[in-house]
Image (spheres, rainbow, N blue to C red):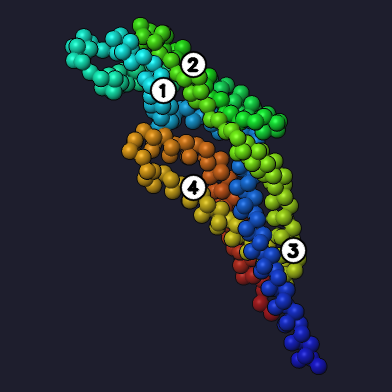
C-alpha cells in the first residue's frame, strides 16, 4: 500500500514538474519579450522619451558628420550648381569647362565644412530637439486620428541650417542654396497608413497584455512546482542571463560592417543604432546584474547558513 502511494506521489510530482517547466519556459519568453515591448512602446509612443532618445544624438561626431553629409547633398542637388560654383570656386577652376558633377565634387567640401560647424553649434542642438519634439507629437496625432498620410517632419532642421549659412562664410551664395520642400520628411502613404495605424493601436494594447501574461505564466510555474522557491529562482536566473546576452547582442552592430560604400553613412548608422538602443542596453544590463546577482547572493547566504548550523 505504501509503495503504491509513493508511486502515485512520484507520478504526481513529475506531472507537476512537467507543467511547471512548461509555464516556466513561457514565462521566460514573455518576460524577455515584455522588456523589449515596454522599451519600444515608451520610445515610440511617449514624445518626451522619444525626444530624450534622439536629442542627444546630435552631439555625437559620427551623427554630426552623417547629418552634414546628407544636408550638403540635398543643398547641392537642389540648388543651381553654376551659381554656387561661381561664388565659391576660383577662376582657374571655373575656366576649365567642368561639367555639373565635377563642379559638385569641388564645392561639396566647401559647403560641408560650414554645415558641419553649424550642426556642431548649440543653436542647432536646440533646433534639432524642438524639431523632433514637434515632429513626433504631430506623428502621434496622425496615428490617433484619421489622416491618410503619416509624416515625420524634420524639414525645419534642414531649413534652419540653410538660414544659418547666411551668416557663415557662404553668405555670398546662401541665397542660391535651397533644399527641396520634402527634404528631411519621412512620408508614409496609401494602404500602409491603415496597416501601421492598426499595428500601433494593437501594440499599445499588447504591451499591457504581455506584462499580464508574463505575471500569470510566472505565477503558475511557481504555484504548480513542487519546490516553489527553487523554480522562481531558476526563472529569475535564466531571465537575468538572457538579459545580459541581449545587452551583448545590442553591441554587435558596432563591430559589424554595414553594406555601404560610404564610410560616413556606415558610422552614422552605427551611432544612430547605438543611441536609439542605449536605454534598452542599460535596462538589459540592470535587469541581468540584479537578477543574476540576487540568485548568486541567495545561494551564498544559504550555504553559509547551512555551514553554521550545528551538526546533529
Residue at the spot of label 4 = 250
Location of the N terminus by quadrant is bottom right
Alpha carbon distance from label 4 to label 3: 31 Å
In the picture, measured across the screen, residue 25 lies left or right of residue 82, that is: right
The answer to which of marks 1 and 4 sits earlier in the sequence is: 1
Q: Which mark is residue 220?
A: 3
User: Is any atom of residue 212 visible in this view?
Assistant: yes
Location of the C terminus by quadrant is bottom right
Alpha carbon distance from label 2 to label 1: 14 Å
Q: Which mark is residue 160?
A: 2
| Residue lying at 66% horizontally and 77% vertically, measured from the top left | 311
Q: Secondary structure at mark 3?
A: helix
Q: Secondary structure at mark 2?
A: helix
User: Is any atom of residue 72 visible in this view?
Assistant: no
Determine contact: label 2, label 4, CB under 8 Å: no
The answer to which of marks 2 and 4 sits earlier in the sequence is: 2
Which mark lies nearer to you, 1 or 4?
1
How busy is the neighbourhood of tag 3: few (under 14 within 10 Å), some, or many (20 plus)?
some
| Residue lying at 59% horizontally and 26% vertically, measured from the top left | 135
Alpha carbon distance from label 1 to label 3: 57 Å
How busy is the neighbourhood of tag 2: few (under 14 within 10 Å), some, or many (20 plus)?
some
The answer to which of marks 3 and 2 sits earlier in the sequence is: 2
Which mark lies nearer to you, 3 or 2?
2
The answer to which of marks 4 and 3 sits earlier in the sequence is: 3
Q: Decide which of 199, 287 is in the foreground and name it.
A: 199
Which mark lies nearer to you, 1 or 3?
1
Residue at the spot of label 1 = 74
Residue 209 drawn at (x, y percent): 72, 50
Alpha carbon distance from label 1 to label 4: 32 Å
| Residue lying at 65% horizontally and 31% vertically, measured from the top left | 148
Determine contact: label 2, label 1, CB under 8 Å: no
Amino acid at each position: 500500500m505504501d509503495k503504491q502511494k509513493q508511486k502515485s506521489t512520484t507520478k504526481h510530482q513529475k506531472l507537476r514538474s512537467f507543467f511547471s517547466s512548461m509555464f516556466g519556459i513561457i514565462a521566460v519568453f514573455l518576460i524577455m519579450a515584455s522588456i523589449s515591448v515596454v522599451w519600444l512602446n515608451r520610445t515610440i509612443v511617449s514624445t518626451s522619451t522619444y525626444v530624450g532618445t534622439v536629442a542627444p544624438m546630435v552631439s555625437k561626431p559620427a551623427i554630426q558628420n552623417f547629418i552634414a553629409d546628407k544636408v550638403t547633398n540635398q543643398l547641392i542637388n537642389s540648388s543651381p550648381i553654376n551659381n554656387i560654383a561661381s561664388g565659391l570656386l576660383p577662376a582657374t577652376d571655373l575656366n576649365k569647362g567642368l561639367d555639373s558633377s565635377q563642379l559638385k565634387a569641388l564645392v561639396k567640401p566647401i559647403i560641408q565644412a560650414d554645415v558641419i560647424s553649424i550642426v556642431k553649434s548649440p543653436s542647432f542642438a536646440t533646433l534639432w530637439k524642438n524639431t523632433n519634439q514637434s515632429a513626433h507629437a504631430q506623428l502621434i496625432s496622425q496615428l490617433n486620428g484619421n489622416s491618410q498620410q503619416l509624416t515625420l517632419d524634420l524639414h525645419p532642421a534642414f531649413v534652419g541650417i540653410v538660414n544659418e549659412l547666411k551668416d557663415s562664410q557662404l553668405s555670398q551664395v546662401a541665397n542660391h542654396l535651397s533644399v527641396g520642400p520634402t527634404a528631411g520628411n519621412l512620408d508614409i502613404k496609401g494602404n500602409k497608413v491603415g496597416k501601421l495605424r492598426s499595428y500601433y493601436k494593437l501594440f499599445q494594447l499588447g504591451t499591457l497584455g504581455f506584462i499580464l501574461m508574463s505575471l500569470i505564466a510566472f505565477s503558475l510555474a511557481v504555484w504548480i512546482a513542487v519546490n516553489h522557491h527553487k523554480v522562481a529562482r531558476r526563472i529569475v536566473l535564466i531571465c537575468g542571463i538572457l538579459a545580459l546576452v541581449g545587452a551583448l547582442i545590442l553591441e554587435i552592430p558596432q563591430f559589424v560592417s554595414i553594406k555601404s560604400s560610404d564610410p560616413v553613412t556606415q558610422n552614422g548608422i552605427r551611432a544612430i543604432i547605438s543611441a536609439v538602443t542605449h536605454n534598452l542596453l542599460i535596462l538589459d544590463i540592470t535587469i541581468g546584474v540584479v537578477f543574476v546577482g540576487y540568485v548568486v547572493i541567495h545561494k551564498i547566504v544559504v550555504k553559509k547558513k547551512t555551514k553554521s548550523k550545528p551538526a546533529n
